[in-house]
Image (cartoon, rainbow, N blue to C red):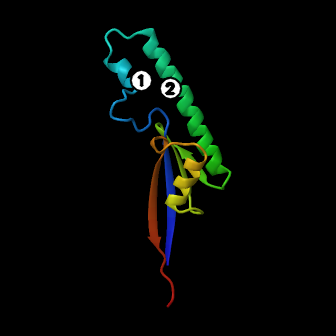
Amino acid sequence: MVDYQVTVILKLFERTWLPDEVPPLERIRTATPVQPEDIYNLRNFLAERLARVAAITQLLLNRGWRSRGTKEAVILEGNDLEAHEVKELLLANGFKPCEFEIKLDYRRKWGYM
């Protein structure tokens, strides 16, 4: 018998960027001089990103998932859904694949035969 755990990783300050996109924080790190518009763009991105992280967290906590934080991410863990079901749930609620990472861990349960 196999037991599994699905982990959803929500990075707080970034997401998966498309090849033609420049992350707002990277724009500030590389700009000389830094323009006020660059700072406003970073503020807007962070406000939207953190709201999306909170919404995904709420959705999974309502299903009984566990959560913990790190300095860069919110980690959610559950075993009531398979990984593909979690992805379908998040997509059905308007989230994009670039907003989350899903990991699946299997553990073997030993028992009597």
Q: Are marks 2 and 1 in contact (CB under 8 Å)?
A: yes
Which residue: 45% across, 9% down? Answer: 36
Q: Secondary structure at mark 1?
A: helix
Residue 81 spot, x, y in % from top left:
57, 62
Where residue 56 sits, quadrant-wise, is top right
- Residue at 49% from the left image edge and 41% from the top image edge: 99
Q: Tag 2: residue type?
A: Phe
Spatial distance from mark 2 to mark 1, Cα to Cα?
A: 7 Å
Judge the density around disc 2: few (<14), some (14-19), many (≥20) Cα neighbours within 10 Å: some
Where is residue 27 drawn, in percent x and y? Answer: 36, 20
Residue type at numbered disc 1: Pro
Percent position (x, y) of residue 95? Answer: 55, 43
Assign a secondary structure to mark 2: helix
Of labels 2 and 1, earlier in sequence is: 1
The residue tagged 1 is 24
What residue is shown with label 2? 45
Residue closest to the eye, 39 or 87 = 87
Residue 22 lies left or right of residue 112; in this view the side is left
